[in-house]
Image (cartoon, rainbow, N blue to C red):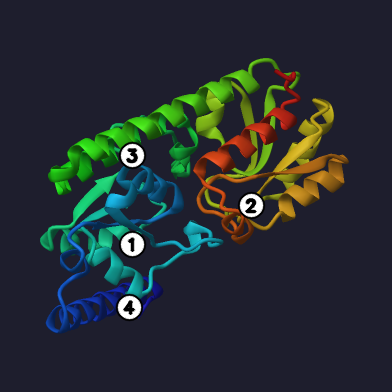
């Protein structure tokens, strides 16, 4: 049995285990949603999507995130207990990209149970490259407004009796995203540099929105190995253009950024692509907006923008 068949078989076993747990729970007690009819369970695959749920649903929902804090989602495979939460949800939000390949394996089963599946990328003009679709659209506060509307509409469909509350919460969230967009425009308006160097390709949406260039050492996958030629070319770019900073990502090892910093005699700056929060950020009660404003300052430093 080759590795792909083995993994598929293991996933089927996990699905069967999930079904057994759910049936057992239903026999001994009502479901979570019927136990507490004042709230519906909304499960999201990754942190930024859970922020859509939390800000839109507020106190009317119970929000759960499958990929835990401090874990890189590219490397994550759900455990049976994670899938139990998904199957017991009223609404399930996913990125609509290859970031969570396991979602497609359970789609038919979820739909048969009446779970409302929400593709947060619906209607977005996603960036496509040689290595696939870039999933990091949540970094763009303009695109994320459309995702907020998509989630709002899903909650309205799943729980229409509270439509006015969901609409009000969504309007407040979108207003904050508009403020964030204005902050990006203001902070990155006038800069001495036009290029940001980063470990792997997470900045395409922000670069497209706010008109700067990106040089990444690797592609979309953080597990991709950088070639010696790529590192050498990037070092040359840093030296030739007098770029003084390299961005390292908060949930990934900083080996490539550290190598560039050493070879080109530049400094590293931390950037969080918001695939999740670090344990330190969780302890500091950070959220989508506080991390985004931190990222704005990081980019302003890297681009040597004039203080506004």
Q: Residue 121 got which mark?
A: 3
Q: Which residue is mark 1?
A: 102
Q: Which residue is mark 4?
A: 10
Q: Nearer the viewer, residue 15 or 219?
A: 15
Q: Which residue is mark 2?
A: 250
Mark found first going from the N terminus, 3 or 2 = 3
Mark found first going from the N terminus, 4 or 1 = 4
Is residue 56 depicted above or below 6 in this figure?
A: above
CA gap, disc 3 and disc 4: 29 Å
Q: Nearer the viewer, residue 155 or 107?
A: 155
Mark 4: which secondary structure?
A: helix
CA gap, disc 1 and disc 2: 24 Å
Residue 202 makes an appearance in the image: no
Residue 195 picture location, percent across and down: 68, 27
Which residue sits at x=56%, y=38%? 292
Mark found first going from the N terminus, 3 or 4 = 4
Crowding around mark 3 (Cα neighbors within 10 Å: few <14, some 14 to 19, many 20+) is: many
Q: Residue 237 got which mark?
A: none
Which residue sits at x=62%, y=26%? 213
Residue 281 picture location, percent across and down: 60, 54
CA gap, disc 4 and disc 1: 12 Å
CA gap, disc 2 and disc 4: 31 Å
Q: Nearer the viewer, mark 3 or mark 4?
A: 3
Is residue 238 depicted above or below 69 in this figure?
A: above
Mark found first going from the N terminus, 2 or 4 = 4
Is residue 166 depicted above or below 186 in this figure?
A: below
């Amino acid at each position: 049995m080759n590795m792909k068949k083995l993994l598929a078989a293991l996933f089927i076993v996990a699905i069967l285990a999930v079904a057994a747990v759910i049936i057992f729970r239903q026999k001994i007690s009502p479901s979570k949603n019927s136990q507490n009819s004042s709230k519906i369970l909304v499960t999201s695959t990754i942190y930024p999507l859970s922020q859509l749920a939390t800000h839109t649903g507020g106190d009317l929902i119970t929000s759960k995130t499958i990929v835990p804090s401090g874990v890189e989602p590219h490397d994550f495979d759900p455990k049976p207990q994670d899938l139990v939460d998904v199957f017991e949800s009223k609404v399930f939000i996913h990125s609509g990209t290859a970031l969570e390949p396991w979602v497609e394996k359970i789609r038919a089963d979820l739909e048969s149970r009446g779970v409302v599946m929400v593709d947060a990328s619906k209607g977005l003009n996603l960036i496509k490259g040689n290595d696939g679709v870039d999933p990091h659209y949540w970094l763009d506060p303009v695109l994320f407004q459309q995702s907020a509307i998509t989630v709002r509409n899903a909650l309205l469909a799943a729980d229409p009796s509270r439509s006015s509350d969901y609409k009000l919460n969504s309007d407040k969230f979108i207003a904050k995203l508009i403020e964030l967009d204005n902050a990006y425009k203001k902070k990155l308006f006038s800069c001495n540099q036009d290029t940001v160097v980063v470990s792997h390709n997470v900045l395409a949406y922000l670069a497209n929105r706010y008109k700067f260039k990106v040089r990444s050492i690797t592609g979309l996958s953080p597990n991709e190995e950088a070639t010696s030629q790529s590192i050498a070319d990037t070092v040359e770019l840093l030296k030739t253009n007098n770029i003084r900073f390299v961005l390292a990502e908060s949930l990934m090892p900083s080996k490539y950024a550290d190598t560039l910093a050493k070879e080109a005699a530049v400094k590293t700056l931390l950037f969080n692509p918001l695939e999740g929060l670090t344990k330190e950020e969780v302890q500091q009660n950070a959220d989508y907006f506080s991390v985004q404003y931190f990222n704005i300052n990081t980019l302003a430093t890297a681009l040597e923008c004039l203080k506004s």
